[in-house]
Image (cartoon, helix red, strand yellow):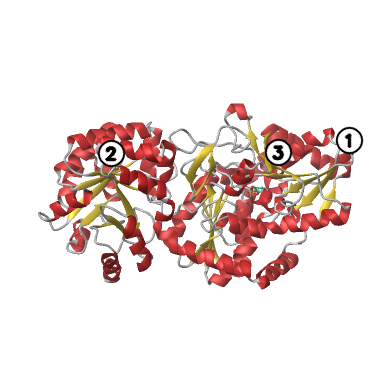
Amino acid sequence: MLEETIRAKMSQKDILLMTHIVIGYPSFDDSLRVVESMVEAGVDLMELQIPFSEPIADGPVILHANQQALAAGSTVERCMEFGEQVSKRFDIPFLVMTYYNILFKYGVGRFAERLSAAGLQGAIVPDLPPEEAETYLAAMKANSLAPIFIYSPNTRSERMKLIDEVAEGLIYCVARKGVTGADTSFSAEFGDYLSRCRAATKLPLALGFGVKNAEDVEFLRGQVEIAVIGTQSIRVLEDEGIGAIKGFIEGLR
Amino acid sequence: MNDRGYYGQFGGAYIPEILVATFDELTLAYESAKADPTFWQEFEELMRTYSCRPTPITFAENLTRHFGGAQIYIKREDLNHTGAHKVNNVMGQGLLIKRMGKSRVIAETGAGQHGVATATMAAKFGLECTIYMGEVDVARQRPNVFWMERLGADVVPVTHGSRTLKDAINEAFRDWVTNMDTTHYALGTVCGPHPFPAMVSWLQSIIGKEARAQMLERTNRLPHRVYACVGGGSNAMGIFSGFFEDEVELIGVEAGGRGIDSGAHAARLASKDASLGVAQGYKTFFLQDDDGQMRHTHSVAAGLDYVGVSPILSHLHEQGRVRFESATDREVVDALALTVRKEGLIPALESSHAFVQAFKEAPELSSDDILLINQSGRGDKDIFTVADAFGDPKWEQFIRDKAEQYNA
Ligand SMILES: Cc1ncc(COP(=O)(O)O)c(C=O)c1O
């Protein structure tokens, strides 16, 4: 279902934008206004991160947002309610991003049912490799949700194919080594990596980590289906306020 | 253990995709070292000539008389170079780093013992070195920070989360996902994703191998009970592994902090407060809330102040092979004071947890019974914390005078 939605959108645009927020940062009200601004600015898909106290794949900006959201009282249940609220109100696909312990403690089956009931379309769980994902995959399938997996530049081609066998919706291609938030130099050798990704899967490719301005999005146009803006929109929010989000997103493509 | 590093339901490797290739490389290096007898020979030789191994067993005659029950023996890991068992694991991983051809090493540290050991190994082997340490621990283990820096390491205080050991581990992982081509992460305990629990247990098993042979030689028997403190669980796994096949009771002692009822502790297996979870790359018991967010822990001993525990120990706990107890901060300081006065030994605050439990049980046993305590490290590093706990007015005056000198 997610894949079809992406393909349908691709028939109208030559690159889609996926943005990311940490639910409850800096507050639930603000998160709602950020989603609203992003949707108005034409964002095609969104990742909603349920905060976790130990986000090992995230750099300082998103780490800080996770901790602030928790300190401000974000709970998993409130995040689910938030997901339900935005997916009812806005007509774009919403995905959940979080770490595996959140699903594990909630109960993986129950978590998937709750996502589905809330109208969310898939999940990204960066610390859950396919080898550990049996229960998760079954639960996602039973609820018609897309389990989204990750490729990285040092993922060997055979492994990419293995991941493709269990992934649905899209493949999230990490642009480089490191955590979220650092700069990425989109260079020529990047082409090799993307063609390896392309050869391993027929799913749409979303590229993230370090995508932050119109120049980066322009570079990716024609190479991947989706450009992912993560940390940069949190920076805009922190430095310039919610009012600046819409203009920032509109300026990206 | 199966090949994904599960011990019963505990363990595994919950790692981000970017690190999968790095873990494959490490697992290969570990397995080939384990299969190669010259590796262990080289390791033993290095530890013999660089770190005073085999460390002796000391009969604690005065403590034995004091409690009037079981005979108390102590395995002296405090006599290692750098003052704790941590160096066993670190020198072993150093040899692996040489085999893998990497030029930089990073590590987390709580008490600073693992950090000092890693910085020492880096100096000896000519590696670049960065140590991540929670800000809270930097403040309470300053002497170790000082030595790490003298040894050439870059010590990075970690300022987020609970600013203790778990946060230092997260930060080391963040470094590693960026620099894995040149860098090895020398994790300091038997936790984290496979192969770390297996690999660190293997390197620390040098303690148990020696201890078993030494007890037989010395007493003609095996001890009835063996005690070790448990932070992540590496000194415990090290000594326990010598006795798994024997009828020897194994007791792990966790940090009871201000008491289990206070909630301010780090007792994962000895209390009912922890539950099964997945964090820091592995599945085990964590002190966490119902949503799966990690809770703050507390211990007077920085090296035991940790939310998770070895998946291998969780499994041994579930099987009933290892018994878990806890010791409070107060009990620990008292046991430390008694050991210093009676035996002239200065156990680290971490190690003193094991002494507490042995002291509770010794009087109830007969003089035929033998207890063995693992003194995982020496207490010199704890001088500031211990002086505060004793409320030593002369020490306080000394610190004031010293500060005056800097102000002058
Ligand atoms: C002296 C000493 N003992 C014990 C520990 C706890 O670690 P583990 O449980 O891995 O032995 C530490 C950790 O820093 C330590 O320094």
- The answer to whether the residue bearing label 1 lies less than 8 angstroms from the nearest atom of ligand 1 is no
CA distance separating discs 2 and 3 = 58 Å
User: Is residue B8 depicted above or below B336 in this figure?
Assistant: below
**Which quadrant: the C terminus of chain B?**
top right
**Which quadrant: the N terminus of chain B?**
bottom right
Q: In the rendered image, is residue B408 in sight?
A: no
Amino acid of disc 1:
Gly
Q: Position of residue A127 (x, y in %)?
A: 41, 51
Q: Is residue A1 left or right of residue B158?
A: left
Question: Is tag 3's residue or tag 1's residue first in the polypeptide sequence?
Answer: 1
The circle drawn on residue B303 is: none
Cβ atoms at labels 3 and 1 below 8 Å apart: no
Identify residue for label 3: B387
Amino acid of disc 3:
Ala
Looking at the rendered structure, the secondary structure element under dot 2 is helix
Amino acid of disc 2:
Ser
Identify residue for label 1: B68
Around disc 2, counting alpha carbons within 10 Å, would you say few (fewer than 14), some (14 to 19), or many (20 or more)? some
Q: B205 and B407: which one is in front?
A: B205
The residue positioned 59% from the left and 27% from the top of the image is B262
> In which chain is the residue bearing label 3?
B
Identify residue for label 2: A116
> In which chain is the residue bearing label 2?
A
Q: Position of residue B267 (x, y in %)?
A: 61, 37
Looking at the rendered structure, the secondary structure element under dot 1 is loop
Looking at the rendered structure, the secondary structure element under dot 3 is helix
